[in-house]
Each structure stands twice: as C-alpha cells, then as structure tokens.
Amino acid sequence: MKDLIIFGASGFGREVAWAAERQNKVAPTWNILGFMDDADDIQGTEINGYKVLGNTADVVNYRDACFVVAVGASRTREKIVSNMKTVNPFIKFGTVIDPSVEMSDLVTIGEGTIICAHTIITVNIEIGSHVIINLDCTIGHDAILRDFVTLYPSVNVSGITNIGHAVELGTGMQIIQGKNVGDYSIVGAGAIVVKDIPAKCTAVGSPAKPIKFFE
C-alpha cells in the first residue's frame, strides 16, 4: 500500500477519501494519511477520521507519500499543483479511481487524476494529469481530456471530442460528437455543446454560446 494525502479538505476531498476507501475494499491500495489544506482554521483538526496534516508548505515533509488535489476549480487546482511542485520538486502524485468505474484497457490516464463512482469511459481515450471526473459521467470513444480538466457530476462527453487544458464542464451538461472546447473555458451546468467553444470564455445555454471572455 502507498501513503496517500488528499489536498483539499472540503466536501469533494471527503468524497475522494471515500473513493480511496472503496478502492481498498477491492484491493489494498492506499494508506490514507489524511488531508492537507491552506485554510488556517482547520489545521490540526480531524475530518471524517483523518487528520489535517498541514498546508502547502508542509508538502516537503511527506516525500514518500502520493498526493491528489481534490479541488474542483481547474485554475485553482493548477495553481496548487504548481505551488506543491515548487515546495517539493520530487513530489509524487497518485491516481484515485473508484472501483465502480467502467473503463476499457484502451484508456491512458495521467498522474494526479481522480475518477469518481459510476462513471463510464469507453475506448481509445486520453485523459491528462490532474483531471477530475466527478460522479456519473460518460466519456465516448477517441475523446481527449487535457491536463486539469474538471467534469462535474453527470457530464456526457461524446466521442471524438477535444476538451482543452483546464476546462470546466458544469453539472449535467452534454457535448455532441466531434466538438472542441478551448483551453480554460467554462461551460455552464445543463448546457448542450453543438458547436466548438473558443478558449477562455464562459458558455451557457442550449445550444451553448459564449457570454463572457476572460484572460
């Protein structure tokens, strides 16, 4: 078993701990050491039976542990990972995949990725590093999810799609086959993507359309 620390002690962090516990019931995988978080008010406390072990600066004290970052916002997660690597250039990241996930052997997954319960991932799919795929999502054949992508619960990604770096896809949204979502864009809950979404925008609606651009 490998030591695991979950960075982010909020609700999603607790869900990731539950997924790791579920992995252990199938095959001993993780020795969950506890949480880390930059919130000062929870340092030294215990959450769902696991201690809060410190903040980003304390990453260096756990050189043999694997980390996952359980923070949904893609840009925030990317910044946290960058800071962790600065503190400890040799940091190791784990991959937490709930045992109920249905996935073919023709899927590649990068380090630090979290895949939650009842998700279906089919064939010839590329999933980058530090990706979060939340509960009950589907991802179709030949899709590509770049680093730091976030899928919130019940997202449906059809085949031959390209989801750009640090994109966020809101709860219950859908993407038809062959479409692209540009880097750092956010697609709102319940949206339906039938045309490509450009980079660095917020898109909402059915069909989804950009309503705001940002840097």
Image: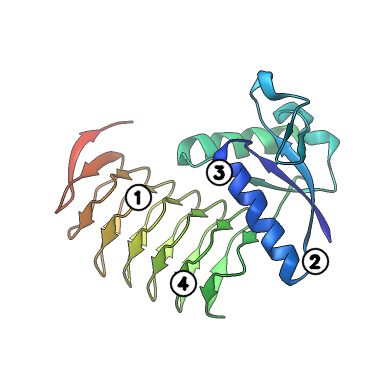
Q: Are marks 3 and 4 in contact (CB under 8 Å)?
A: no
Q: Badge 3: few (under 14), some or many (20 or more) residues near its Cα, within 10 Å?
A: some
Q: Nearer the viewer, mark 1 or mark 4?
A: 1
Badge 4 amino acid: Ile
Q: Earlier in the sequence, mark 2 or mark 3?
A: 3
Q: Position of residue 105 (x, y in %)?
A: 57, 80
Q: Position of residue 172 (x, y in %)?
A: 32, 54
Label 3 and label 4: CA atoms lie apart by: 21 Å
* Left or right: where 64 falls relative to 138: right
Q: Nearer the viewer, mark 2 or mark 4?
A: 2
Q: Earlier in the sequence, mark 3 or mark 1?
A: 3
Which of the image's four quarters has the N terminus? bottom right
Question: What label sits on residue 171 in the rendered view?
Answer: 1
Badge 2 amino acid: Pro
Label 2 and label 3: CA atoms lie apart by: 22 Å
Q: Are marks 3 and 1 in contact (CB under 8 Å)?
A: no
Badge 1 amino acid: Thr
* Left or right: where 145 falls relative to 95: left
- Residue of label 2: 28
The residue located at (47%, 41%) in the rendering is 74
Q: Quadrant of residue 70?
A: top right
Label 3 and label 1: CA atoms lie apart by: 14 Å
- Residue of label 4: 121
Label 1 and label 4: CA atoms lie apart by: 17 Å
The residue located at (44%, 60%) in the rendering is 145
Secondary structure beneath dot 4 equals strand
Label 1 and label 2: CA atoms lie apart by: 31 Å
